[in-house]
Structure formats: structure tokens, C-alpha cells
């Protein structure tokens, strides 16, 4: 029986999508009826008389989907170009278009103001290489093979699984030029091996040694990468003056004018690509190194944000009671000089990350201005996202990302600005993933998506900002090289989040009543039905997507 405050706040779970039934592998059934489609969804309803949840069916009639290219052809419009702008590791709540009252990002806001903002977009995995590989392949990590960052350590790998094709290869076959500027970090081959023009930085790249950036600096009158001064604030022994690459490197100040920083380099090379491809159909990616640590703003932006004005995260004081034990171990044993500090120290680090983000935002403004100056804005879809989120001290002082699936690390910004259509300053609560950009970009460019991919196109948002594309999203964690030997799977319905932890107890959060995920209610007696339905949904999705852990997960969840 559901009791107390939790019951009162869960009497309207009818908004949560639920599966058609155990073992189906799908969350809806469809029946084609001429020009329309029937969708039958099972949803929960709390019955106070019986003191439990029951489930009812709801039938929705929808119009059949046409690809964005088909819709363009129907009205005689030219297939647009696509510009993808991607950050590396950013908290959604750091962006002013997503509600930040401290950090201002006016140029990113320009995209949101003239487009559509996804409130419930997620990464499929909160680690750089597999998240980027999922975005560019449309596949979950167990299919593209990049389980964590490019490394041969343990069961890691440096290259994608055999036969995996990425966006550029598919797009080039349709006579679309592909440009890439900035961080790659998908495999050791680099973007040119997959059909891109532009920068060639395999692996992580900056702030490590990158020959192309070094030569670019020298071409702008600088003596080169190895002589770039950095004031590093994050070393255990205190502030030190050093040079790139920083010896410890979490945050500091870089001794370069903003336009010569790595962010300025990405903007400059993106503008070069726009000029070079202005007379052709194109898909260009601007991939920034940041605000992933080390957060290194230039002197122009350092000090922009006053640490005293940054309030503690609502879950900064999380004692992790009732959470899997690895979370406390991960926090206390790795980078303890960060995790063991009080908010007075953390907020200084957060302020420098905000300074860094403000500098990157200005470089994004240069790209958007260049797009308009070249006369390309009216024919180009602009998409903005990140590979995953960041902790920055949330949940008791967590650092970076790791064996937890909190909103701070799995939720991502997603903005789409269309040259035509209804989406202008719209906000959608439709569930989406950054992996879905694979199918979306192909759809926008008029290229068929391979049938074996997990991504779904979000291009319909252009003409219908209220369109629904997914009933749930699935998240993964396969370990983090030597730092996080741990397996997790997540199912997110928009309101409820279920996390399967085979090495410990599971997690269940109701994001309406507990948006900061402070209370794990997995063992709440009255939620047995909810827990079972969510685990059935997750097990079915794992089976449907070919997750190699699907059968064992079903057994460990106690499902038949």
C-alpha cells in the first residue's frame, strides 16, 4: 500500500508512459488505418480504494510520419544544410536558456529563442567516447563497441566495432560535404578517416599536444602550444604557474587572447569550413573542448562570475544514504582534494567553469554571426547539444562523471533552429536523446537511416513542436576504465527513473516530487507495481536493442 507524502504526490501518474505488457519488447502497439496510426499505451492510475496502482489503456490516433525531406519536397523547399554545435560535458542548468540566473550564455540563447528547446533530452551514456560514437552512429554502446573512452585498458578498445558506419560516410554518399572542427574522441582514426574535411585530431586532443592547433597558433604570431602559460588553481599544493598541458588540470586561467584559445581555434576552423562549403550542401560539426575540465578561460573572461553569488546545489549536502555504496567510494577515494571540500571551495571552481562557458559562448556567437554574414542562415538547420553532463560537486561533492545516473550527468541540452516551420521559441517536453541526432540529421538531409540503428528522427519538431518520438529513454554505464568497474542500465519515462545496478541495490526516483534525486524509493512498499513495470520495460528494451546483458539482467531483476 502506498502511504504518506509519497502516495499523495503520486496520485496522478497517468502522465507516465507504460508498456503494453511484460515481454513484448515495446511500449506501444500500432495499427495502420489508412492515413492514420493507432497507438495503444498502458498507463498507471492510482486507486485509493484498493491502495495500489492499476493500469489502463489509452488509444491515440496519429498521422503517419513523413521525413523532413519529403515535407520539404511537398512544398518545393530546398533540403537544408546542417550545422551541429557540440559542447563537451556541460550541466544543463549552467545555460541561461535553461534557467541559469548566474551564468549567461546569450549566443546559445539565440538558438533557443529562434528554435525549439528540448527539456527532456538525455545522453545514452555519460562518458565522452561512447556518447559521441552513439551520436554519430545512431547505436547504443554495446553495438558500436566503444564501451568507455578510447583505451585498450581492460575490455576497452580504441576503434569502433567492425562494420559500424558513421554519419559522414552516409551523408557523403548523398553528395553532401562534411566538415569537422574540434574535438573528435570517437576512435583513434580521426574524422577524416570517416569522410570529413577540416581538423584532424584523433582521440581527446587538447589541452594535450595537437600539432594542428600548434601550427595554427604559430601562424597567428604565437610561439606555439608548449609556451602557452596557464595559472592552475587546482593542484593539491596550491596555485602554480605552468604551461600547457597542465600537470593536474581542473581549472585555471589560460594566457591567451580569447580568439587564440582552443575555443577560438574551433570557431575559426568552423568559419573556414562555412566559407569553403558555402556553395555546396553541407553538414558541419563544431565540437568544442569544453567546458570539460580543465576549465581555462582567458583573462578577458576570468572573474566574470563572482563565486559569492553561486548558491550550493540543492543536492550538494546529499549524504548518499540509501544509494549504491560505490557512489560514496567513488567520491571519497578519487580526487578527494575536490570531493572532500566545502561549498566555499567548490563554488570557486564552478565560477571558473562558468567563466569558461561564457568564453565558449562568445565563440559560438562568432559562428552564428558568420553563418548570417555568409548568407547561409536561412538555409541551415542549427543544432546545439553536448555529449553528456557534469557533476561539479553535486550529490555530496561528486567529481566529473562516474557510476551514477543522475540528471546532472545524463541530461543534456538540445536546441534545434530551423530556417522554416512552426518551431520558434518553442519548448518541448518530448523525450529525446542526443543519439537521435544521427537519424535527425540524415532525415533533414534527405538520407535514409539504416534500419538497424537505435536512433529515431526528431525532425518532425520543425512542423509540430508538440510531437512525441519516444515513450522512454535508456541509459547505459559500462565502467570507466580503471576508475569505475561497474555496470548500470537506466530507464527514464520523463517522470520516473529506474536504475538497474547488478552489483548493488537498484534505484528509483520520482522526479516530480524529488527533482534532485535525494531519496531512493526502490524499497517503498507501495511501489512494487511501479518497480516491476519499470523493470519489465527496461528488460524489454535491453532485449530489443540486443544488449548482451539482457537475459542476465532479467534474471537479476527477478523477472520471469
Image (spheres, rainbow, N blue to C red):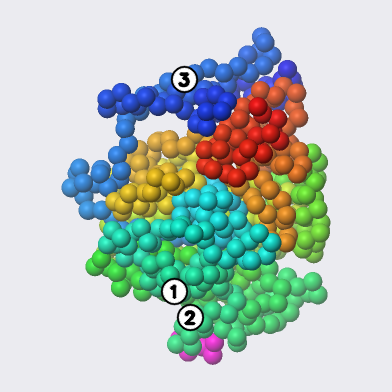
Viewer-proximal residue, 108 or 38?
38
Specify which label sits upstream in the sequence, 2 or 3: 3
Verify whether residue 34 appears in magenta.
no
- Expressed as whole percent of the image width and height from the top left, the position of residue 206 reads 57, 74
**What's the distance in space between the residues labelled 3 and 1, CA to CA?**
50 Å
The range drawn in magenta is: 220-224
Q: Which residue is mark 1?
A: 199
Secondary structure of the residue carrying numbered label 2: helix
N-terminal of the pair, mark 3 or mark 1, is 3
Q: Are marks 1 and 2 in contact (CB under 8 Å)?
A: yes
Return the residue at label 2: 212
Relative to 421, say whether 13 is above or below: above
Residue 89: x %, y % from top left: 58, 59
Q: Position of residue 114 (x, y in %)?
A: 37, 50
Quadrant containing the N terminus is: top right
The CA distance from mark 1 to mark 2 is: 7 Å
Q: Is residue 356 above or below residue 417?
A: below
Residue at the image point whose x is 58% and y is 80% from the top: 209
Circle 3 sits on which residue?
Answer: 58
Q: Quarter of the image holding residue 499?
A: top right
| Viewer-proximal residue among 175 and 409 | 175
Q: Residue drawn 76% across and 38% down?
A: 505
By secondary structure, the bulk of the magenta-drawn segment is best described as: loop
Q: Where, quadrant-wise, is the C terminus in this rendering?
A: top right
Dot 1 or dot 2: first in sequence order is: 1
Q: Does residue 251 sit above or below 309 in this rendering?
A: below
Amino acid at each position: 500500500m502506498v502511504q504518506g507524502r509519497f502516495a499523495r504526490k503520486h496520485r496522478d501518474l497517468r502522465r507516465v508512459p507504460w508498456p503494453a505488457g511484460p515481454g513484448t519488447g515495446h511500449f506501444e502497439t500500432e495499427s495502420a488505418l489508412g492515413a492514420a496510426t493507432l497507438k495503444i499505451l498502458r498507463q498507471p492510475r492510482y486507486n485509493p480504494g484498493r491502495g495500489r496502482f492499476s493500469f489502463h489503456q489509452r488509444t491515440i490516433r496519429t498521422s503517419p510520419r513523413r521525413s523532413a525531406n519529403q515535407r520539404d519536397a511537398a512544398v518545393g523547399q530546398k533540403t537544408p544544410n546542417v550545422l551541429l554545435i557540440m559542447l563537451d560535458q556541460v550541466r544543463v542548468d549552467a545555460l541561461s536558456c535553461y534557467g541559469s540566473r548566474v551564468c549567461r550564455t546569450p549566443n546559445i540563447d539565440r538558438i533557443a529563442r529562434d528554435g525549439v528547446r528540448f527539456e527532456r533530452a538525455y545522453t545514452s551514456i555519460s562518458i565522452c567516447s561512447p556518447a559521441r560514437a552513439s551520436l554519430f552512429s545512431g547505436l547504443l554502446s554495446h553495438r558500436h563497441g566503444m564501451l568507455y573512452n578510447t583505451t585498450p585498458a581492460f575490455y576497452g578498445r580504441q576503434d569502433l566495432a567492425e562494420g559500424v558506419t558513421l554519419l559522414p560516410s552516409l551523408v557523403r554518399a548523398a553528395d553532401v560535404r562534411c566538415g569537422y572542427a574540434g574535438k573528435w574522441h570517437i576512435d583513434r582514426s580521426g574524422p577524416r578517416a570517416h569522410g570529413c574535411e577540416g581538423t584532424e585530431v584523433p582521440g581527446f586532443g587538447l589541452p594535450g599536444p595537437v600539432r594542428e592547433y600548434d601550427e595554427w597558433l604559430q601562424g597567428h604570431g604565437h610561439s606555439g602550444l608548449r609556451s602557452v602559460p596557464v595559472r592552475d588553481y587546482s593542484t593539491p599544493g596550491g596555485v602554480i604557474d605552468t604551461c600547457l598541458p597542465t600537470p593536474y588540470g581542473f581549472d585555471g586561467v589560460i594566457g591567451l587572447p580569447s580568439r587564440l584559445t582552443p575555443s577560438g581555434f574551433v570557431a575559426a576552423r568552423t568559419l573556414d569550413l562555412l566559407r569553403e562549403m558555402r556553395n555546396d550542401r553541407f553538414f558541419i560539426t563544431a565540437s568544442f573542448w569544453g567546458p570539460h575540465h580543465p576549465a581555462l578561460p582567458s583573462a578577458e573572461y576570468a572573474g566574470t562570475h563572482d563565486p559569492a553569488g553561486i548558491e550550493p546545489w540543492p543536492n550538494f549536502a546529499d549524504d548518499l544514504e540509501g544509494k549504491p555504496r560505490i557512489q560514496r567510494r567513488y567520491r571519497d577515494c578519487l580526487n578527494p582534494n575536490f570531493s572532500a571540500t566545502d561549498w566555499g571551495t567548490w563554488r570557486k571552481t564552478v565560477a571558473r567553469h562558468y567563466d569558461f562557458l561564457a568564453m565558449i559562448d562568445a565563440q559560438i556567437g562568432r559562428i552564428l554571426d558568420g553563418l548570417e554574414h555568409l548568407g547561409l542562415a536561412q538555409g541551415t538547420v542549427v543544432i546545439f547539444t553536448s555529449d553528456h553532463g557534469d557533476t561539479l560537486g553535486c550529490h555530496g561533492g561528486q567529481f566529473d562523471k562516474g557510476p551514477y545516473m543522475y540528471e546532472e550527468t545524463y541530461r543534456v541540452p538540445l536546441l534545434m533552429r530551423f530556417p522554416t516551420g512552426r518551431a520558434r521559441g518553442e519548448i518541448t517536453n518530448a523525450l529525446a536523446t542526443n543519439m537521435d541526432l544521427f537519424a535527425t540529421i540524415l532525415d533533414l538531409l534527405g538520407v535514409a537511416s539504416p534500419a538497424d540503428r537505435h536512433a529515431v528522427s526528431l525532425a518532425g519538431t520543425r512542423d509540430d513542436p508538440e510531437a512525441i518520438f519516444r515513450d522512454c529513454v535508456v541509459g547505459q554505464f559500462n565502467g570507466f576504465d580503471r576508475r569505475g568497474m561497474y555496470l548500470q542500465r537506466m530507464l527514464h519515462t520523463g517522470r520516473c527513473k529506474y536504475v538497474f545496478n547488478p552489483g548493488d541495490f537498484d534505484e528509483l526516483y520520482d522526479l516530480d516530487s524529488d527533482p534532485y534525486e535525494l531519496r531512493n524509493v526502490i524499497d517503498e512498499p507501495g511501489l512494487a507495481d511501479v518497480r516491476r513495470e519499470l523493470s519489465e520495460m527496461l528488460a524489454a528494451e535491453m532485449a530489443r536493442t540486443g544488449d548482451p546483458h539482457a537475459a542476465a539482467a532479467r534474471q537479476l531483476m527477478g523477472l520471469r
